[in-house]
Image (tube, rainbow, N blue to C red):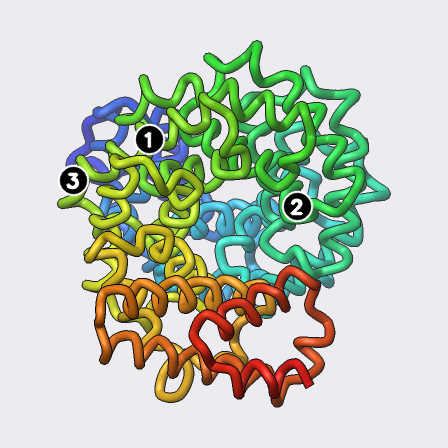
Amino acid sequence: MSRLDKALMKQIDPIALSLFALSFGRHSSAASCREAAVAIAGEVPSQLSRFDPQALSNLVNGFSKWPGASDCREAAVAIAGEVPSQLARFAPQALSNLVNGFSKWPDAVGCREAAVAIAGEVPSKLLRFAPQELANLVNGFSKWPDAASCRHAAVAIAGEVPSKLLRFEPQHLANLVNGFSKWPDAVECREAAVAIAGQVPSQLLRFAPQALANLVNGFSKWPDAAGCREAAVAIAGQVPSQLLRFDPQALAKLVNGFSKWPDAVGCREAAVAIAGRVPSQLLRFDPQALANLANGFSKWPEEAFTGQATVAIAREVRRRGDQLSHFTQQALANLVNGFSKWSEDEDICHSAAVIAGEVGRRALSDFTPQQMAHLINGFSKWPDDPACHRAVVDIARGLGRGGQRFGAFTTPEFNMIANALGRGITRGEDAGEIIETALLKDRLHQLAHHLHYDNDRLEQSDVLTIATIFKALAKARLFEDLGSLAS
């Protein structure tokens, strides 16, 4: 049945056809199953009226196993267009499956709109969903964390979790934590995650490797919660002896998560163990994973294995120089931030220069304030490299009036920016670069001017942040700004 032609598909009952798609999805690695599912997907948009709600749900669930297949995407988007006007016809399980499926195409407007419509129904129907369905909903809604309805639905589900923990399977718990972590500021999501964390240490052997990675990555969004830390440390203790069970992306998630507790011995030992495996598996990591590894390892710069792994990552990034467009803005910022902890290494410097070129080809407005702060601070660690210094100047040009206003940055980010501008000014003056140095001084002056009028910010800063900003102003001989802040 893996080969289907159009004539045969029109003779098959719609429910049966949807079950075929669902079944094929369970064997997504088989080329014949993919071929058959894609064939079914090609017929769906023109035959939507033949399928009842359960069949539509089955189809989306099946097609979601091949999110890169254009016919599967088009069929899912076509089905999504039907959902908002027919919500009352779908059973709770079908709604859960739809959200789970649509989440594989988070950038498709139709899928987003259908998921948002479903989210609006969830809070009033919570008691009708089974535990697995609640977990799938949270995990699915988390692909649209900025959608108010998705947040409200996730928060409503979070409120139910602590009292029902024993009803969830380990995989469900991992999906819940992974989903809730997209709204770390929501009190209910935090409380639900902490409640789940309390169950983890005593059930470690019940979790699959991917689930453990999702738990650590999720718990890391609440690093100050004792329960989350204890659960992460417990998981870390299992990692060194089970490294071969984790796929590359899971290893990257673990390092990214453990890095939020750099002082925890268990997290450090697990990260070092993972670092030992990275150089031999570089080709298996995608761009985001490479960036997460470099950024995570940078929390332990004194460890030989983390340094060696990061140098290997830097060489790999340089080797993929013509593919840097595949790296997101966040990935580029994470790489530079991570590499900067080993700024004296020649391979890392060369890789940073390649990234600087890629950053220069993108619009600064595409980067968030946090990303800009990490980039300018990171690039400033290589003042003698022309490409990195050019990147510092270009980012500085996009700060303040006419660019990214200083009010958008956090106090720690002010610290990074001031530090970077100070280094750039020193380098520029030593090299006799008058115009660029004047630009950097002007941005440092604007930063000080902002802080002068945002007095609360300075008063709430720690001693190190204040000292860093004052030191940068003194280096730049901006004594008037220094005096106004000190008064």
Spatial CA span between label 1 and label 2? 42 Å
In this figure, which residue is indicated by the disc labeled 2?
134
In this figure, which residue is indicated by the disc labeled 3?
7
In this figure, which residue is indicated by the disc labeled 1?
311
Observer-nearest residue: 184 or 160?
184
The amino acid marked with disc number 1 is Val
Observer-nearest residue: 331 or 352?
352
Taking the image as drawn, is residue 87 in sight? Answer: no
- Is the residue under label 2 in contact with that under label 1 (CB below 8 Å)? no
Residue name at image x 35 percent, y 73 percent: 396
Spatial CA span between label 3 and label 1? 57 Å
Position of 464 compared to 109: left or right?
A: right
Residue name at image x 69 percent, y 60 percent: 185
The amino acid marked with disc number 2 is Leu
- Is the residue under label 2 in contact with that under label 3 (CB below 8 Å)? no
- x, y percent for residue 451: 59, 82
Label 2's element?
helix
Label 3's element?
helix
Label 1's element?
helix
Camera-side mark, 3 or 2: 2
Position of 121 compared to 78: left or right?
A: right
The amino acid marked with disc number 3 is Ala
- x, y percent for residue 274: 48, 21
